[in-house]
Image (cartoon, rainbow, N blue to C red):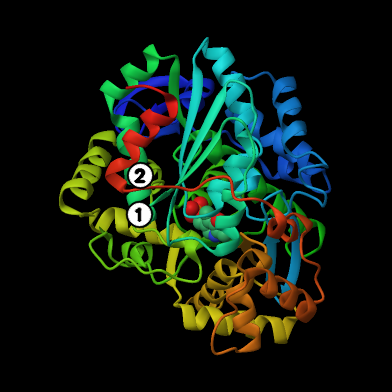
């Protein structure tokens, strides 16, 4: 399987796409085709271990990695140690609705599903491409990617990792998780701005040819652990197949029947992985794309116009506080059957005017696959309480957005196919907001560890150990930079002038 840039140009193998992270024309790497999976194949996945399901999907895309190699890397990533429970759990929570829990990894968010595997894929990729330089992973995070990437890359030989997070844009637990990160090769910096500022800063550093040259001389090359990297996206395709196989196994769907997936969305990586699964042959009806008050995607799906020129909202689902969804570029490429010139034009409009319009034809294609919906903080809180009291199930703030989007979609469309809601974080990770929702407190609990205990008492679930222990760990990172200062900070950390 070969990969191309969404903006035209080069053709590379999987290892090179993963090692480089982003194409030299600023585009994202996309597969040239979709490996076909039949209903018979899917039948073979029913009842199988996640490791088997993962190897089955991944070896179709990572053809320049040997099958044994893929199996070995998958075994390392989804080990018992990293995922003491099963890597993914499907729970039937209400009639016709299951929740796919993707947060049983080390940092309690779904990012672990990809970021436990990415370092292994990357190290092998570097080996394969003959790259001798130290790989510097630059990360912009809305909260969860940062910690998951730090966990994945800490003390991995041949790598350095530098994480930028918006100073005021992450939950207290998320911040503590990152600031207490140990490892000889890790740095964490706060950016005085929002996630989009951090993300554009990182993209600029990637696209700075002079800087790349300078770093190359000092023995460094950049790569990305954000979902612009194909190595972040491809592991996520697996759990769509896994979820379907589990839904067949527990009798929620008949083999071959379509299901709908509902995805709490920010950078469009998670839901795009589902789109790839569908293109490969997974029986999917609709994807419901659920956003918070940063509703740029819901508007885009409704109108075909992507317009980032709007107020940025800080919400209780901070990992979805994003106005520029990077991975949409990949979807546009596939929607236009690979029209790189068209995609590059839209991306230019976005950069220069802040918006682009895909027109009626592509809008209708988009609407055939996706339903967009957004939910504000008030309704998110109400949904957490409703689901907790009606179904005895505790949702985190991001998953609650998706749950309500699921209900709204069913009501509006009358489509009552079995729905699988992707659950992207443990409720403990956003304990403060979750607790406030179920206790109907007027104000939130300022002390995050008090909130953890209270939430545990209320729900009967135990606080994850790694989260409790944060209280006694020392803060190791305290650097703060302006968005304009990000490049200088990277140079200083790497010791180049
Ligand atoms: C990252 C994240 C999202 C958004 O996922 P995308 O792939 O960026 O669309 C949703 N919920 C949580 C908890 C996350 O960490």
Q: Residues within 10 Å of mark 1 (few under 14, many from 20)?
A: some
Q: Residue at x 71, y 34 (%)?
A: 56
**Of label 2 and label 1, which has the lower sequence position?**
1
**In front here: 79 or 186?**
186
Which residue is painted at 51% across and 67% down in the image? Answer: 317
Residue 373 occupies quadrant:
bottom left
Left or right of 84 on screen, residue 18: left
Q: Mark 1 = which residue?
A: 192
**Secondary structure under the numbered disc 1 in the rendered image:** loop
Q: Position of residue 112 (x, y in %)?
A: 64, 46
Image quadrant of residue 124? top right
Residue 336 picture quarter: top left
Disc on res. 329: 2
Residue in the image at 60% along x and 22% along y: 123
The numbered dot on residue 459 is none
290 or 413: nearer the viewer: 290
Q: Where is residue 206? Give x, y as percent.
A: 35, 31
The alpha-carbon separation of the residues under discs 2 and 1 comes to: 27 Å
């Amino acid at each position: 399987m070969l990969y191309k840039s969404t903006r035209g140009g080069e053709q590379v193998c999987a290892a090179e796409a993963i090692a480089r992270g982003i194409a030299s024309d600023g585009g994202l790497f996309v597969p040239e085709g979709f490996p076909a999976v039949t209903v018979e194949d899917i039948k073979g996945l029913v009842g199988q271990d996640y490791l088997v399901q993962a190897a089955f999907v991944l070896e179709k895309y990572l053809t320049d990695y040997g099958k044994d190699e893929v199996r070995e890397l998958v075994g390392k990533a989804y080990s018992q140690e990293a995922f003491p429970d099963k890597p993914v759990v499907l729970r039937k929570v209400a009639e016709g609705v299951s929740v796919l829990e993707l947060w049983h990894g080390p940092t309690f968010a779904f990012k672990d599903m990809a970021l436990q595997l990415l370092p292994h894929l990357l190290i092998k990729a570097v080996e394969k491409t003959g790259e001798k330089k130290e790989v510097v992973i630059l990360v912009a995070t809305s909260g969860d990617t940062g910690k998951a990437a730090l966990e994945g890359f800490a003390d991995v030989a041949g790598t350095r990792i530098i994480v930028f997070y918006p100073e005021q844009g992450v939950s207290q637990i998320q911040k503590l998780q990152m600031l207490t990160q140990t490892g000889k090769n890790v740095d964490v910096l706060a950016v005085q701005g929002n996630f989009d500022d951090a993300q554009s800063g990182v993209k600029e550093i990637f696209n700075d040819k002079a800087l790349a040259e300078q770093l190359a001389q000092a023995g460094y090359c950049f790569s990305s652990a954000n979902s612009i990297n194909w190595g972040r996206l491809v592991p996520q395709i697996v759990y769509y197949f896994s979820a379907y196989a589990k839904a067949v196994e527990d009798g929620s769907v008949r083999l071959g029947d379509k299901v709908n997936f509902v995805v709490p969305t920010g950078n469009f990586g998670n839901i795009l992985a589902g789109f790839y699964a569908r293109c490969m042959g997974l029986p999917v009806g609709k994807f419901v794309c659920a956003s918070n008050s940063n509703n740029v995607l819901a508007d885009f799906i409704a109108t075909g116009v992507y317009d980032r020129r709007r107020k940025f909202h800080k919400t209780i689902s901070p990992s979805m506080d994003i106005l520029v969804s990077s991975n949409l570029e990949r979807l546009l490429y596939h929607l236009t059957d690979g029209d790189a010139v068209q995609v590059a034009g839209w991306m230019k409009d976005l950069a220069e005017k802040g918006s682009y319009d895909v027109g009626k034809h592509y809008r209708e294609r988009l609407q055939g696959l996706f339903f967009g919906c957004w939910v504000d903080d008030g309704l998110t809180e109400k949904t957490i309480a409703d689901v907790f009291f009606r179904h005895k199930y505790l949702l985190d703030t991001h998953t609650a957005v998706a749950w309500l989007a699921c209900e709204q979609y069913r009501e509006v469309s009358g489509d009552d196919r079995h729905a699988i809601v992707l659950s992207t974080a443990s409720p403990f990770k956003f304990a403060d907001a979750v607790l406030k929702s179920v206790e109907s407190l007027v104000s939130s609990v300022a002390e995050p560890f008090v909130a953890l205990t209270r939430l545990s008492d209320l729900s009967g679930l135990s606080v994850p150990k790694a989260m409790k222990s944060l209280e006694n760990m020392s803060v190791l990172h305290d650097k703060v930079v302006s968005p304009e200062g990000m490049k200088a900070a990277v140079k200083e950390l790497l010791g180049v002038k």
